[in-house]
Image: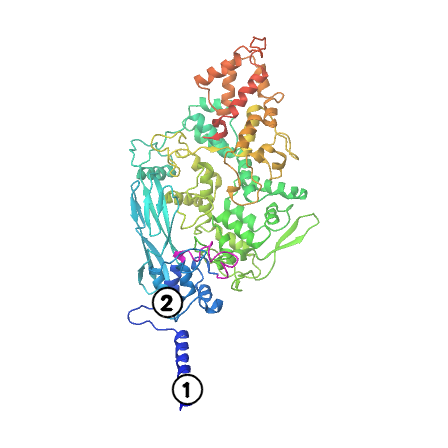
Amino acid sequence: MVDCDLQRFVLLRRIIGVVLLALLTVPVRADENHQSINFVNDVVPILTKAGCNAGVCHAKAGGGQNGFELSLLGFEPSHDYEQLVRQGRGRRLSPGSPDQSLLLKKASAAIAHGGGQRLPKDSHGYAIIREWIHQGTPFTGASDPQLTSIEVRPARGTLAANAEQSLKAVAHYSNETQRDVTQLALYESNNDAMAEVSEIGKVQAGDIPGKVSVMVRYQGQVAVYNASIPLGAPLDELPPPNNFIDELLFENLMDIGIPPSQLADDATFLRRVSLDIAGRLPSASQSREFLDDDDPQKRARLIDTLLRSPGYADYFANKWTALLKNRRDEASDITSNFAFHAWIRDSLLANVPYDQMVRELLAATGTVIGNPAVAWYKRVKEPKQQMEDVAQLFLGVRMQCAQCHHHPFERWSQDDYYGLSAFFSRVGRKPTGVRGEDLIFHQRGIAEAKNPKTGQMIAPAALGADIGEITADHDPRLRLADWLADPNNPFFARALVNRYWKHFFKRGLIEPEDDIRDTNPPTNPELLDALEDHFLSSGFDMKELVRVITNSRAYQLSSVPNEYNIADTQNYSRYYPKRLQAEVLLDAIDQVTGAQTEFANLPLGTRAVALPDNSYNKASPFLRVFGRPESQSVCECERVQSASLSQSLHLINAADIKSKLATRAGTAEEMAKDSRGIAERIRDLYMAAFSREPTIEEMKIAEAYLTEPRTDTDGEGVDAKPSSHEDFQDLLWALINTKEFLFNH
């Protein structure tokens, strides 16, 4: 009898164990009091908001943290589901006792967690994930709605200084339903000094007037809130507009209530536009001729003269060769570097349309001798690098992040990355008889690139556009060039006009200039659209773009702030002074002192802005100290424009500066020998350095220094002749060390 009872007990225990096991492994249906939880729609947003799938946490490159790897910001929910539910032998979740799940215990800091507490036990996020585990960790059903977009309410508005605005984020789904996701969305201001935003979408404006944007991100979808923070100052009188730029820029200033500065005087404009277009100072005689001219159209005529000058081609070729990595790594590179620089310079001088230049570059075939444009393929050899450079330089789109994961601030995926790189997959190379030079050609075959994560072969694909099928006989780079030049391309023309706007105004309408995306809106969208349309209608005419920008009253405003616009850094209510680039400054010092810098393999008198590649930096301490780029990157940020102690010391006491001041037959020596009066000679120096006459105070100081009696070390008078060579050296030294000389203003 005892044995029978024991057998019944064992059998009953086994039955209970089987039932419990089934309960633990079979998903539990939601009861009437709990809605069904969807991993994609409900759980991933909580992990994202808590920062679990941030790049510094479990989405860290190289395997996450401690063996637990999530996709960046939840862009790959199937991968995340696999990691949570099945990886680690399922130990991260406990459906039979959700509170004992390792995921919740670590997130709530019930046990030690390197990331600290992310989900308190009394939080809504903890409750949702707990219920999801209790329901058996469902992923998503075929009939479950999918997120299609999000919107932010309000989408735009006006905020008074120091005012607050609460944002509401609304998710839209494929079944036409909506959900308030304000608490789960991520928020980021594009300018914390102008406005800060809290984790729940409360915007706190500062006291700096202008335009500010807040990015709202939820599950791969992005919306942007744009706000104006007006100053509200009276705008009694505006300069008369000269073109559409002025109309749109002044309209924006009126909206936010920031009065612009007055127009710059003729001397300031002459120096400014000569430096910005030709990279050089006007001579003293040119300055006098311009200042004495009474023609009201003289500024427009000066701009046209500068655009026809070799200086324009030299200066902008210097800009483009650096961005296109015309770099000399070996002595044998000299031929290709000189040829590539000459091709760019000649194209600019002849005003070849921008789209044609880019087409000739991207689709280049042959050798450097026959087609210098192929030199670009010498420096940029891998299809992925070629694609990244083209995207950043010609589209203003940074694709680097999308190589490994979905772009965190954009809609571009890994497939977009490899689809764009596939355009360069058929570029062939063959060695030639010249060391280091290859023959570039199109290899016949199907163009495609492999996505290493999915293993799929991706055909060439433009960003957000259908370019059709590309046959094996057709060079895909030609199709890429066609798409770039298409008027419907939302990036190509926009990127160029924004880049050139920054060249002349110091700050792009979109900043940085090569980061164009929905989440980085322009400070004046209407103006950027109008510039893009004008560039397209001109047939990609780069000289016309320069002409319309520099003829605007906006460009010709004074850099001297008024009492209202002194804090403005983004609305162009005044000209923003910028330091002279290394090459321009070296040329300016040579011009004022009458010296000539010698460069290897180049004729004497070659300007620094005309140097073909980066190799001359090694032999010139000046160019290194003042930040001439080494052509390693397509980013203009490689050029150092910030001031440093080494720069100040170099200008004050460097040997090359001393030698330029003391050069034989230089300016100082000529001035010392000149028989004219001291005042006339001082005027010449000021006209050469600043394109203006000295002020009364400046004249008094300079005259006193050049004519006062000298004393020896004992304080006794000496018979040294006034206005000696050394005296004029000192005056020149003082002039080139002023901020007025070192800055374009």
Q: Which residues are magenta?
A: 48-68
Magenta segment: does it hold 153? no
472 or 153: nearer the viewer: 153
Residue count near mark 2 (Cα–Cα under 10 Å), binned few <14, some 14–19, many ≥20: many
Which residue sits at x=42%, y=89%?
Answer: 3
Q: What residue is rendered at 38% in x and 73% in y?
A: 27
* Relative vertical location of residue 14 with respect to residue 626 in this rendering, above or below: below
Of the 4 image quadrants, the one containing the N terminus is bottom left
Residue 60 is inside the magenta segment: yes
Q: Is residue 676 above or below residue 265?
A: above
Q: Quadrant of the C terminus?
A: top left
Mark 2 or mark 1, whichever is nearer to me: 1
Residue 146 picture location, percent across and down: 37, 64
> Mark 1: which amino acid?
Leu
Tag 1 secondary structure: helix
**Residue at the far right in the pictured view:** 433
In the image, what residue type sits under mark 2? Trp
Q: Nearer the viewer, residue 152 or 490?
A: 152
Q: Main secondary structure of the magenta part?
A: loop
Q: Disc 1 designates what residue?
A: 6
Q: Position of residue 384 (x, y in %)?
A: 55, 54
Residue 489 percent coordinates (x, y): 45, 51
**Rounded to the nearest whole Å, what is the CA distance between mark 2 and mark 1?**
40 Å
Decide which of tag 2 and tag 1 comes sooner along the chain: 1
Q: Residue furthest bottom?
A: 1
Indicate the quadrant where residue 260 lies: top left
State whether residue 33 is above or below residue 122. below
- The secondary element bearing badge 2 is classed as helix
The answer to whether one can see residue 544 in this image is: no
The residue positioned 56% from the left and 30% from the top of the image is: 586
The dot on residue 132 is 2
